[in-house]
Image: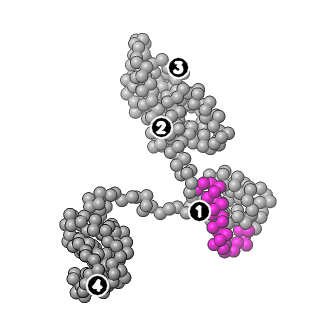
Amino acid sequence: MVKRYTLTKPQRAAAVLVAMGKSRAGQLLKFFKSDELRVMIDAAHTLKNIPQPDLEELVKEFESEFAVGAGLIDSAETMNKILSETLSDEEMYALTGAKTDQSEREVKESVWELTAKVDTDDLVAFFGNESPQLCAVVLSRLDSKTAASIIQRLDPALRKGTVARLLSSKPVPATVMATIEKRLDEAFKLSGPSTGSKEGETRLAEILMEMNKDISDDLLDALSPVVGDKKVAGVKSRLFRFEDIGTLTKESRSVLCDGLSTEVLTTALRGVDEEVSEAVLSAIGQRSRRMIESELADGRKINPAEVDQARKSISALALRLAAEGKIEIHSTEEAEAA
């Protein structure tokens, strides 16, 4: 038989493996060396459609009794699938140098799963401008506790109409459901850039903590009418300066100070307001307090940069402890008296 074109040996091997399918090819791959597999991967990327007669001839050379299926299309992609399902992540990385993208493995959350995470206050406000039909469809997809909380807060007329629709609910046509999902997506930006809002809040908080407190506070107040109180509150929840230590409960202050050396505390307290100083000193043991007070009384001057660094390290520790649930840095309760 006259070949229409000539394949290299690696190309021929790759073509036959792809034609065999994942199950049978996977068994053979175990017998290849790493360098041989690399060569075949490269060869697979150069393969194009192979005519059926040529494919049959190739297969016969490798396996006398092999039933051939359709011709090969996109051999590189098929080869990658065979390798990824046959080899471990470590072996795949060693062969191709590419790490598995975990994000592609994750199942994308549906509009309804994302809607269930929306703040209840925002949902109530949203329903206030919608029809009973739409409200009923959305509420039927939420958990009972959330749905009950929302229904109780709806306008009486809307509440009555929504509950009536829930009682007489019928299967919702796919086209209508798609419209509702789109409405929710647009209203709450479920699949938009809002997914990165937490990162934005964290980044802004980091910047603000480097600024003068009065200026950053004024800036946050000015932002509220622009981006909304909820987003500003998100930024504030990520803010904590050393001067805020007096807002912590005594228990939280004690936990925070327990993780700090007397040297760091002494440096941070240099030149601080008496109120802040007392908030710290009242949260530590008497022996440590006497040592720090003695150091502060010597009048020794410290590089302002060292003081600033000590205070930032305390702020960072407070935020980490709060993230771990060990202290409360933004409690509505007033701090305990020193």
Q: Amino acid at mark 2?
A: Leu
**Magenta span of residues:** 165-190
Q: Which residue is mark 2?
A: 319
Q: Which residue is mark 1?
A: 112
Q: Which of the 4 image quarters holds residue 305?
A: top left
Q: Residue at x 42, y 16 (%)?
A: 296
Res. 289 visible in picture: no
Q: Are marks 1 and 2 in contact (CB under 8 Å)?
A: no
Q: CA distance from mark 3 to mark 4?
A: 87 Å
Q: Amino acid at mark 4?
A: Glu
Relative to 25, residue 257 above or below: above
Q: Residue at x 31, y 68 (%)?
A: 46
Q: CA distance from mark 3 to mark 1?
A: 51 Å
Nearer-N-terminus badge (3/1): 1
Nearer-N-terminus badge (1/4): 4
Q: Which residue is mark 4?
A: 56
Residue 237 percent across, percent down from the top left = 55, 39
Relative to 200, residue 284 above or below: above
Q: CA distance from mark 2 to mark 4?
A: 66 Å
Q: Amino acid at mark 1?
A: Trp
Q: Amino acid at mark 3?
A: Asp
Point out which mark residue 273 bears.
3
Nearer-N-terminus badge (2/4): 4
